[in-house]
Amino acid sequence: MEHPIFALRAGDMQVRRYERNGHTLTVLPGATGCATIHDKDLWIYCISQLIEAANRGREIGPTVRFTAFDFLATTHRGTSGRAYERMSEMLRRLKGTVVETSIETAGLRERRGFGLIEGWRVIEKSQDAGRMVAVEVDLPKWLFRSVQAKRVLTLSSAYFRLRKPLDRRIYELARKHCGEQPRWRISLAVLHQKSGSMGELRRFRFDVKALAESGNLPDYLMAIDLQRDMVTFYANGPKGKLAEVKDMLAGRPNASLKAHQKAHSARSRRR
DNA sequence: AGGCCGACATGAGAAAGAAT
DNA sequence: ATTCTTTCTCATGTCGGCCT
């Protein structure tokens, strides 16, 4: 996806419209607002469920079934009653947000519209109102096809640890545009556009500067040239040693989970 | 332009109750 | 006993508005 579909802010009711060489994309929020970058976690979760199932040699279809608890836990969310409610809101926003595209080629214009998910189903136990037993999400066909074709971008598990919506978006962009190349250079104005941030440029500049200085962006280093208003991303070798060591120091999921399991089994052996 | 505040929202984690 | 679910509390995010 070239243009930012997901909003950075909750309850965003703005209609966004992007245009690039005879190619327009319109994002129409549903009644409860536009799907946010956090809602995208549900997408990513469903996709990874499918990929995992496929890797185990199981038959996969566009419908993904899972428990609410598992989703909340694996995306590092809380599991409060409010978190469950928010999950329903997520489904509603994903379903309600409509994306329309229009492509012009050789004098023909084709327009299409689609939701971010086809539909959803939450199965609750009736005698104990409100308990979500299982959730089913129907992914749109085009998304399912790109999963089958393995054309989905893999994200570092550190992605879920990125709290700031803007940081997440910038990481995605770096991942997409810089990828494995040693570096990627872009003007702040264009990055601002690509990010989908609705704030003013000066504020965006301030936020990007903060991100660069914090060094919180996984896999990449950022340098800002304030004179020319350019940002450069340097790939830190996503598979390199340095990244692994940094993961460990930062106590990121994979490293820390293994360490925790080790400690745990040592404890049980002593007992 | 740069920076701060606050409205409205998300997020983490502890502790405890419920289900299996 | 273990796993799931809820409630509570505190910390942090975006961005419009406001001040300097």
Image (tube, coloured by chain):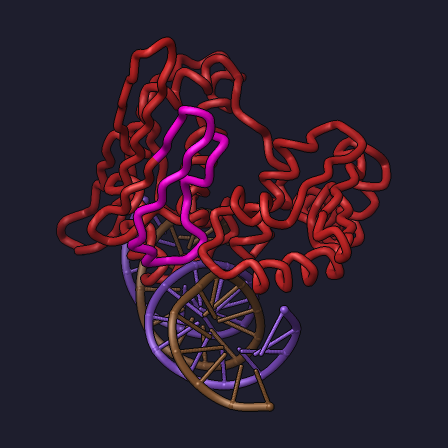
Chain colours: A red, B purple, C brown
Q: x%, y% of residue A122? A: 23, 41
- Residue A110 can be seen, yes or no: yes
Vertical placement of residue A141 versus A224, above or below:
above
Give left or right: position of A147 versus A232.
left
Q: x%, y% of residue A201? A: 56, 58
Give left or right: position of A100 versus A242.
left
Q: Main secondary structure of the magenta part?
A: loop
Which residue corresponds to the image point at 75% horizontal and 57% vertical from the top-left?
Answer: A226
- Which quadrant of the view contains residue A97? top left
Give left or right: position of A247 versus A130.
right
Which residue corresponds to the image point at 52% horizontal and 54% vertical from the top-left?
Answer: A165
Q: In the depicted view, which residue is nearer to us: A80 or B17?
A: A80
The stretch drawn in magenta includes residue A88:
no
Q: x%, y% of residue A26? A: 33, 37
* Name of the residue lying farthest toward the front: A107
Q: x%, y% of residue A77? A: 47, 54
- Which quadrant of the view contains residue A79? bottom left
Report the magenta residues as a range: A1-25
Q: In the depicted view, which residue is nearer to us: A257 or A225?
A: A225
* Name of the residue lying farthest toward the left: A127
Q: In the depicted view, which residue is nearer to us: A156 or A71?
A: A156
- Which quadrant of the view contains residue A80? bottom left
Q: Quadrant of the C terminus of chain A?
A: bottom right
Which residue corresponds to the image point at 78% horizontal and 53% vertical from the top-left?
Answer: A225
